[in-house]
Image (cartoon, grey):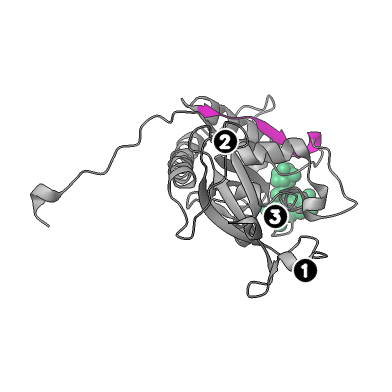
Amino acid sequence: MTSGDYEAPARMVAPARALYVPVILGTVRRGRMSLPVARVVLAELSRRPDIDTELIDLAQFPLRVDDAGEATKDAGFSEKMSRSDALVLVSPEYNHGYSGLLKHVLDSCLKEYVHKAVGVVGVSAGPFGGSRGIEDLLPVLRELGLAAIFWDVNFSTVQNAFDESGALRDQAYLPRIGKFLDELVWMATTLRHGREQVAMPQAESPMRCPKCGAEMNHHAEKVLQAVDLADRSSVDPALGGVVEELHSCPACGANASRRATARG
Ligand SMILES: Cc1cc2nc3c(=O)[nH]c(=O)nc-3n(C[C@H](O)[C@H](O)[C@H](O)COP(=O)(O)O)c2cc1C
């Protein structure tokens, strides 16, 4: 290749639709310090152009604890996860791990997350900024189909980070949050492009978008292990579960899925 063949990489342009990036507050504990942390991150996210965001507070969530996994799915939460381009998880460290309730709620969805970006903000009373909980959370996020970014934000000794009015004391957190959000937005933009434009090699018989009727892009397949396997005919014998195809609409951004057996 000569230097004349070189094409500069395309610059990121403003997306046609705002990116939807909700912030999930991962604890219901009374007096939780993760709340002012989530508010700061939300404020920094809200300041950015072309971003639609909101706080999803588990304390306001219709939490079901009589079952687990997709059986506990809340329609409103599912719709938000399906619409999202990226997630920010505010994750307190509890006994060197992540919040059990956060995991329980995340487990209620699956295909909604696939090929979406996620960034984690760790919060702890101790000196490690929730990093032990973040490290434990990463394999979970991967199994959910989320793509974790390589920037975290770590709020250590968080009890000292805010004054009595809830205002941030240490302004050095703001550029750290800024770098974290830069990377998250880049990943969200890139993954949206992939979901909507880059097809799996075996993509065939496209789905029509249930919202706008456009031809959708088949961007992923996920083996569902936790479905009701009463219908053995839909289990792929080689993969040990039901294969779900994930499709995204290049026109309106809607997501839809179907069993791979419906292909053809
Ligand atoms: C059950 C429990 C376990 C905790 N374990 C740790 C820990 O292992 N390391 C740490 O630094 N802080 C620990 N903390 C303190 C929290 O990290 C601290 O409260 C921080 O503010 C984040 O949690 P919060 O949003 O509930 O306040 C623990 C708190 C609880 C309730």
| Residue 22 drawn above or below residue 198 | above
The label shown at residue 183 is none
Closer to the observer: label 3 or label 1? 1
Please name whichever residue, 152 or 238, is drawn nearer the observer in this view of the structure. 238
- Residue beneath disc 3: 98
Binning the other alpha carbons within 10 Å of mark 3 as few (below 14), some (14 to 19) or many (20 upward) gives many
Please name whichever residue, 133 or 65, is drawn nearer the observer in this view of the structure. 65
Please name whichever residue, 157 or 30, is drawn nearer the observer in this view of the structure. 30
**Horizontal and vertical percent position of residue 162:** 63, 33
Quadrant in which residue 98 is drawn: bottom right
| Residue 253 drawn above or below residue 261 | above
Tell me the quadrant of the picture where the N terminus can be found: bottom left
Q: Tell me how far mark 3 sits from mark 1, CA to CA.
A: 35 Å
Residue displayed at 81% across by 61% down: 228
Tell me the quadrant of the picture where the C terminus can be found: bottom right
- Residue beneath disc 1: 232
Instruction: Indicate yes or no whether the magenta region holds residue 257.
Output: no
The label shown at residue 21 is 2
Q: Are marks 3 and 1 in contact (CB under 8 Å)?
A: no
Marked residue nearer the N-terminal end (3 or 2): 2
| Pointer 2 residue Cβ closer than 8 Å to ligand 1 | no
| Residue 27 drawn above or below residue 220 | above
User: Range of the magenta residues?
Assistant: 51-60
Identity of the amino acid at label 1?
Arg
Residue displayed at 45% across by 59% down: 201
Residue displayed at 43% across by 31% down: 15
Residue displayed at 57% across by 36% down: 21
